[in-house]
Image: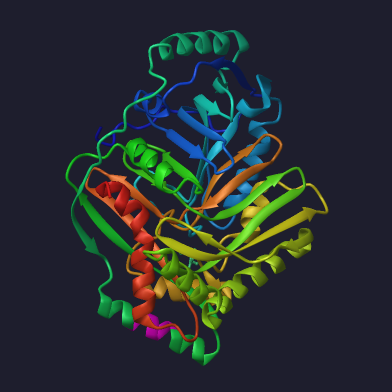
Amino acid sequence: MTVPRRDGPAATAPEAEGATLVSRSCELADLSYRSFLSGRDPPRVHWAAPDGLEVAGGGAAARLRAGGPGRFASLREDADRLFSTPDVEGPEAARPRAFGGFAFDADHDPSPPWEGFPAAEFVVPRVQLTRTDETTWLTVSRYGDDADPMTVGEELETVRTELADHPAMRPSGGVPGVAATRLTTSREEWTRQVRAATDRIDAGDLRKVVLAQALEATLETPIEVPDVLERLRRTYPDCYRFLLEPTGAASFFGAPPERLVSLSGREVETEALAGSVARGESPETDHELMASLTGSEKLQHEQGVVVDTIREQLEPLGEVRVGDQAVRKLATIQHLWTPIRAELADAEHVLSIVEALHPTPAVGGLPPDAAWETIRETEAFDRGWYAAPVGWFDAAGDGEFAVAIRSGVASDDGVTLFAGNGIVADSDPGEEWEEVQLKYRPILDALAGE
Ligand SMILES: C=C(O[C@H]1C=CC=C(C(=O)O)[C@@H]1O)C(=O)O
């Protein structure tokens, strides 16, 4: 499939006072998500969390968009209206949720390769599949003028009948193959950029900055993003997987290892993931590399800055508990990782926690303003939604967000991949370059079929 060029159908923004979100669900025999998604028009979403929740959605019952510095507050208001008088019948797992995310920068203005991606957008899918450990559910939702229980019930029945023909399993699709790659930042430029950042750190107004690069991959055949995600499921089973396709113009997808936040009631779970080395070819070299990671003063400093900042950001909201540091091993890279939990003093919407945390110094830097200024002055490409929050929230304000790293944006012209690295006082440009190249691997290998 070529990424379809259709615009998604119009959907109601939650403006109408008194409008109701109507949602009905039924159990379904297991069904291939890739088969389901290939039959749906944009907007399309796919979300899979390491804990087993997997959702695929097509069409929009409602769309929420926002931009500028007030984007979080504006979305919370829209969410309150959208979910104010829901008429929902179905199990908890299949409840309506809004899926989407944010651009890294509040003032993001979509231009290629980010066509169709505003500064923030969430969609409540019109038709949604939800898979938990044992069961698959089909949900149909509507909002606004055409939302009444009878028509939603009828649509549920119609879609259920249509999906009866879809297979439970679909053979693995082919890979698009990578014909050529082009780095947006040369090694010489990178060396200059890292040196300029470390000079600024030495001068005293910056402690850490995460500098990123982009890589443009031209493909041999058109991409089927759900097939690429299926490959990523097999190689990176402990990571999130997501696909966000607001219109037919471009698809943002990835397999991020990093949770920004999950909120259930008053329980917040987040983590610090920063400081990286490669995996070793043998158990011995892998162990040596791990020891070089845990024993590195520089990488521990990088990690410590993230832990301290997240703790400081959450402390005004409740009691924070920082867990023991461990090493997170993925197929091609290993990271320092520290779990962090908080018990909120008052009920909060997950979007408020996302607002408090984004960007953590694992993708931005410290102090945040000096880091953002450095990023803007240094990076010659648009980060778009890379390294920003992607995930979902529900009527109760619970939700889960990943940090959209190890990701790429696909359009008819190919895929643009992004990868960044934390720069601190004693960063060496050559080592930082090697680490960045490792971070392209998940998506590049999945595209190339390696
Ligand atoms: C910014 C990225 O990684 C972050 C997460 C883990 C380790 C990182 C590091 O070692 O610098 C980065 O902070 C990326 O993958 O693009």
Residue 3 pos. (x, y %)? 28, 36
Q: Quadrant of residue 19?
A: top right
Q: In the displayed structure, does residue 48 sit left or right of residue 214?
A: right
In the rendered view, tell whether residue 153 sits above or below residue 1: above
Closer to the camera, 174 or 420? 174
Residue 32 pos. (x, y %)? 41, 25
**Looking at the image, which residue is at 65% across and 19% down?**
90
Closer to the camera, 402 or 292? 292
Q: In the displayed structure, does residue 261 sit left or right of residue 33?
A: right
The magenta region covers 192-197
In the rendered view, tell whether residue 60 sits above or below residue 310: above
**Looking at the image, which residue is at 79% across and 53% down?**
344
Q: Quadrant of residue 320?
A: bottom right
**Looking at the image, which residue is at 70% across and 30% down?**
84
Q: Quadrant of residue 273?
A: bottom right
In the rendered view, tell whether residue 1 sits above or below residue 259: above
Q: Is residue 112 visible?
A: no
